[in-house]
Image (cartoon, grey):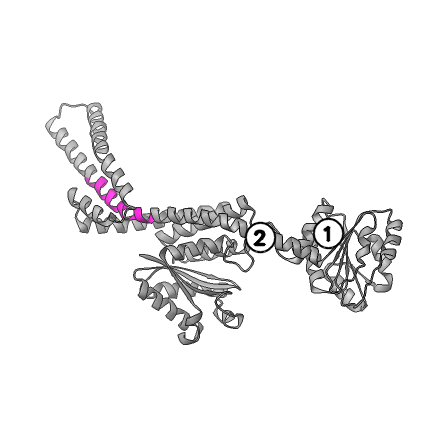
Amino acid sequence: MYVMVVGLNYRTTPIEIREKFTFQEQELPDALTRLKQMKSILEAVIISTCNRTEIYAVVDQLHTGEHFIKRFFSEWFHLPKEEFAHHLYVKQDREATEHLFHVIAGLDSMIVGETQILGQVREAFFIAQTYKTTGTLFNRLFKQAITFGKRVHTETGIGQNAVSISYAAVELTKKVFEHFEDKSVLIIGAGEMSELTAIHLHSQGVQNVMVANRTIEKAEELALTFRGKAYSMEDLSHALLKADIVISSTGADSLILSRAQVADVMKKRGNRPLFMIDIAVPRDLDPAIQDCENVYLFNIDDLQEIVDGNIRERQRIAGEVQVKITVEVDQFYQWVNTLGVIPLISKLREKSEKIQEETMKSLENKLSHLSERDLTIIRKHTKSIVNQMLKEPILNLKENAIKPDAELMMEYFRKIFGIEEGELRESVQYEHRKNKEIYQSERRFELKTSLFK
């Protein structure tokens, strides 16, 4: 069996093509079911976001699996393969597994380290589990990847550093104010950047939002978004008296606030701290305003420096995460390599237990004078002998399962202990059923306890 991913993302495909390959959440059950029914596809998970659409699959043949996944894309979205095939990337086995860990850690995102993708992958996996399109390999792989993604974001803080102008403004504001519940923000102008910054501040607890604009109707429209109050530009000084945070982003071709105006307002405020962010180009606020006592003035270049520094920090952390990914992938494939020995071990134990039971029956028949206590002691010691005899062979089998000649070694092992191939196939089927039941039980437990919330 092989792990494979076939997909497209913001790096390989323009938005006008990407938007044609979006699965709606309500479509996923049918899509997964149909995909699983296709030749060579043994397990499947579909991840579909605004920046990527990827099909992860366990296939019995790489070439055949790739062919039928591409065919599924073509049939589901009613597009000839020639129109999109060159946009698709195909990754196999270790490369495909590494890719999943990159995605879930946010290393493959447009904004490195973003956390939203973790929830999206988790949900995609849970949907696939619910509709029984995952099995032994993907139940293990995706659970390991989800746990890893959560640990990365918690331990490294890769998603905590602001990498947008609006978030950087909030980060700066936090350095001045410990909390926002009792603070007021004044938006000057109706610019998109200042609105985004206000939205982020509002989400941090700012309750009172004021909007000043040359066109009062636009000010009222934006203020309504925050259940705030609108001001005309003529009333700007009055609004400044109430504000703790000012975000300015107008289209004016000259300064709208001078140092003298702000100094006068500060006297009336009793020099209560005023935090000002000028996102406009050309600037709205006189740079000399920063000389006023208790006024903190920042412009878009200051914010960009923070963003650039945080991006560099995320990239540095990404390098550390890459090392962790290598370890995780190694662990996964070590586990995969041991899957082949599990049926062998199960069959060997089954055979040894049968021999031990037959021996005990013979003893009971030949030594009828033995008490139940005597038989219990003998049964315990014969089991101990069997377990001790098998301990070293089983340990060596597990250790050698990750070596290049593992298959040859397992074949020798099978012949030495007289395990028939037919018996082994039955054991393999049993192990698959058992693993499936275990993971379904774990899934129910996770849903009940909200393990990943």
Q: Which residue is mark 2?
A: 312
- Above or below, 437 relative to 255: above
Q: Which residues are magenta?
A: 335-351
Tag 2 and tag 1, C-beta contact below 8 Å: no
Residue 171, percent across and down?
67, 50
* Circle 2: element type: helix
Q: CA distance from mark 2 to mark 1?
A: 30 Å
Residue 150 painted magenta: no
Give the overall secondary structure of the magenta segment. Answer: helix
Viewer-side residue, 290 vs 105:
290
Residue 199, percent across and down?
69, 57
Residue drawn at x 23%, y 28% is: 380
Residue drawn at x 48%, y 69% is: 21
> How many numbered marks are there?
2
2 vs 1, front mark: 2
Residue drawn at x 42%, y 52% is: 142
Viewer-side residue, 254 vs 125:
254
Residue 395, percent across and down?
27, 38
- Amino acid type, residue under disc 2 in the picture: Arg
On-image quarter of the N terminus? bottom left
- Above or below, 192 relative to 447: below
Which of the 4 quarters of the picture holds residue 79?
A: bottom left
Query: Along the polypeptide, which appears first: circle 2 or circle 1?
Result: 1
Q: Which residue is mark 1?
A: 206
Instruction: Give the numbered dot on residue 19.
Output: none
